[in-house]
Amino acid sequence: MKREILHRNLLEVLKKKVPEKADVVEILMKLLYMEKGAVYRRLRGEVPFSFYEIVNIAEKLNISLNDLVYSYADRVDRFEMSIQSTDMNSMDYKHWEYYISMISSVKGDPLSESAEASNVLSLSIYAGFDSLLKYFLFKYQYLNSGMESRISFKNFTVPERLTQIIKEYYYESKHFAKTIFVWDYSIFQYLVDDVKYFYSINMISDEEVQEIKKDLFCVLDYIEKITVNGYFEETRNPVFIYKSDINLDSIYSYMQINDVYISLVRIYILNSVVSVVKSSFEIMKKWIQSLIKSSVLITKSGALFRTEFFEKQRKFISEL
């Protein structure tokens, strides 16, 4: 019912913007790079508009995304990115391109903010390290493949276009005026245990484990430098990293980009459940703030806690 309300609201706005139905179809075909039949199915309500389709329509037709959802601010409308493989199709890539385009718009916005509470390293942290990026995508592919189609780390290749998309995200994500990370205190242990598992079932070789281990030490040095300086070296935008004293059970995040408010529950790397309703954003922000209360800031403060945290993570990595 919630998605039906948003769908109906979008159609009403489109009618006002483009009175003739035939014109709406032609416009949406061009905006969404879709065939006529696919557009008609969305207009008839047989297939819901995805989050990124709505964002693209709103952007190109000068429709305020907040105006589209604010009248239903007490409701939670969700849109899913359902990518089942690293072998993404053209529409999957379009979704990610829309997403990155939105993020790149934070440049110059002094109120922009990004926050994530997680038991997994953020893509904006590890994507600059090739072995780690390949490993996370390998694990994602492994979990989404049937037994007969699983391939080893050695034989796994990352599509060039996907690598480019992720590298763009890695860079653009560092332009928020404020970035917050709340990390599980055993975040590297979980990663190390996963690598050990893949090694035990002969999916990763000794040599490959050492490559991953080397990158893990490098990314830890990269993170430690952020905590000492208090900013991303690439952009000098401030970063606040917290060590959570309780286990985190998922990956929660929110982003404020100009007048758009986004909350996400990430499902590993490429999938998320996304809401653009401001009330959902406020709930997510409140939740992450509550996690911060049971955490310790290790950026430019808490030197003792920071030292203990990095010593503990290096000990986990050394076990590989």
Image (cartoon, grey):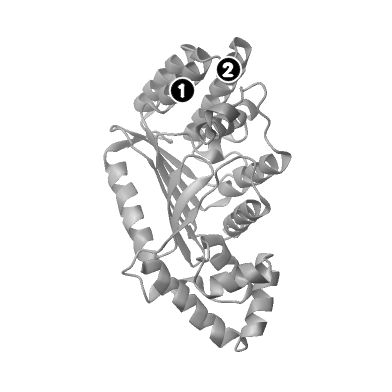
Position above or below: 88 against 60: above
Q: Secondary structure at mark 2?
A: loop
Q: Which mark is residue 194?
A: 1
Q: Amino acid at mark 1?
A: Asp
Position above or below: 37 against 311: below
Viewer can see residue 109: no
- Which residue ends up furthest to the front in the rendered image? 148
Q: Amino acid at mark 2?
A: Ile
Q: Residue at x 41, y 71 (%)?
A: 4
Cα separation between marks 1 and 2: 11 Å
Q: Residue at x 63, y 80 (%)?
A: 24
Q: Which circle's residue, 1 or 2, is located before the other in the chain?
A: 1
Q: Which mark is residue 204?
A: 2
Position above or below: 256 against 72: above
Image coordinates of residue 26 in percent, x first then y, are 69, 77
Looking at the picture, tell me which residue is in the foreground, 30 or 217: 30
In-image side of 222 versus 4 (left or right)? right
Image coordinates of residue 14 in percent, x first then y, are 55, 81
Image coordinates of residue 264 in percent, x first then y, are 43, 52
